[in-house]
Amino acid sequence: MPDAAIDTQRMEKIVSLCKRRGFIFQGNEIYGGLNGVWDYGPLGVELKRNVKDYWWRVIVRERDDVVGLDGAILTHRAALKASGHEDTFSDPMVDCRTCKARLRADQLPEKNGVNQCPNCGGRDLTEARPFNLMFSTQLGASADPDSIAYLRPETAQSIFVQFKNVLDTARKKLPFGIAQIGKAFRNEINPRNYIFRSREFEQMELEYFCRPEQGLELLDYWLEERLKFYENIGIGRDKLHVLTVPDADRAFYSKGTYDIEYAFPFGMQELEGVAYRTDYDLKQHQTASGKPLDYFDEETKARFIPHVIEPSAGVDRTVLALLCEAYDEETVTDDKGKTEVRTVLRFHPRIAPIKAGIFPLLKNQPELVTKAREVQALLRPLMNVFYDETGAIGRRYRRQDEVGTPFGITIDFETLGERDPALRDTVTLRHRDSMEQERIAIADLPERLSRQIR
Ligand code: ATP
């Protein structure tokens, strides 16, 4: 295996598989593509949904101290002025005078100490200027500056803006959190590395409010919780790197920030940030809106603005890490001694887009087909299953291996009890990773599979 940091071939294979099997497509492809915009196909949408559902389950549903929010994408200009985004959410940018490319000033290749254009090699570059990453739009028909709104560049701000409403209605005591999953938009200068850096993406964010003295301890607590999350979806700790962001690189209001990084084939890159943001955000919104955003402590009768810990993860980056982690090729030998390369996505069953493939051994045997349809109807309410009756059984297994389906269920003549009545209503259960097969009663499938995919 070549060094992961420079494994472009592996990345190309993953991108190609994702297109071929319907995980991810270039946005607006038939019109030449929209740069930095991606669409998720039938399998991609299932994978993404499983990631979000698991996050929501462990962050919101299985906890007493976190509630959810689904804020709007269109955001008041004043909110993003107060948060600092209007003035400072920018990347330094230069233009190449030779080929007219617009480039990130902090990502320019150097030659002999001089910055170069990565497109044409030119050295005639403009001075760096800040380029705001927010997409603005116009609300209503009038075109005056007051009608400007932004597409949110992160989901977090609506959590801060709705802090008081949630506090009053959910009746939570500190420490407690508000969680949100949703789209965010950034006009990235150089969208790149597939879905890693795009202009429209999804975030899973938690704002966990606490007393000032709890901040640093909770920062470490949430880092640990987030590492556990990745482990539970199949990205082990040994694959992640925790970067303690140095003081000089941290936002001035943050008392501590960790970046959770993953070794993508194009290098070690951020998957999620876990930041202790102090009381900066609520204070900013309180000052700008003139509305109190403080917390009344029943015990001490004191009023204060809570501090906040923010674990902020990217859905798309998590999906990409899962694809990179799962992708595998192995040489297998069949019964006749013939070898072939098997491509397999070794997804954790919890996040696999399809949980089980259901295969009648022969499609021209009505009894097998009827039985297979019965198995499909039995499992469907519990999980995403895929019925496939075309082609040789080995090929059907391979097709499911390639999209990461952990289980294959084959309905054969034994199922009909033709040879051994004791085997009536049993099926072959094939395991994707080991390719081992076992015999199991149809009646036991729901329990057995549900346990493994939960
Ligand atoms: P980067 O330094 O890579 O631009 P960031 O530090 O600006 O990221 P945050 O503002 O902390 O990112 O956003 C939190 C998370 O949102 C990131 O860890 C990442 O997973 C995701 N994210 C941010 N920008 C993008 C993007 N352009 N495309 C996809 N995901 C993104």
Image (cartoon, grey):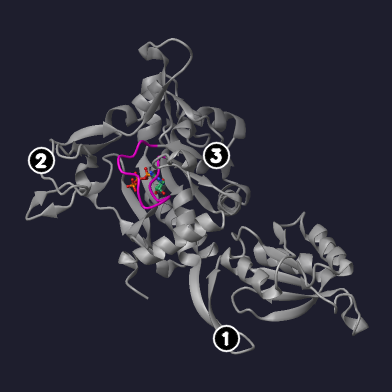
Q: Looking at the image, which residue is at 40% across and 66% down?
A: 10
Q: Amino acid at mark 1?
A: Lys
Disc 1 packing (10 Å; few <14; some 14–19; many ≥20): few
Foreground disc of the pair 3, 1: 1
Q: Which mark is residue 338?
A: 1
Which residue carries the number 3 mark? 173
Can you give x and y, in whole percent of width and height, for residue 302 in the image?
Answer: 45, 32
Calculate the distance from the C-alpha at mark 3 to the C-alpha at mark 1: 65 Å
Picture layout, residue 403 above or below residue 438: above
Lateral position of residue 413 relative to residue 172, left or right: right
- Which image quadrant is residue 167 in? top right
Which residue carries the number 2 mark? 124
Examine the residues drawn in magenta and state their main secondary structure: loop
Mark closer to the chain start, 2 or 1: 2
Q: Which residues are magenta?
A: 186-199
39 or 269, nearer to the observer: 39
49 or 208, nearer to the observer: 49
- Which image quadrant is residue 305 in? top left
Calculate the distance from the C-alpha at mark 2 to the C-alpha at mark 3: 58 Å
Disc 2 packing (10 Å; few <14; some 14–19; many ≥20): some
As for residue 195 lying within the magenta part, the answer is yes
Can you give x and y, in whole percent of width and height, for residue 336 in the image?
Answer: 63, 89
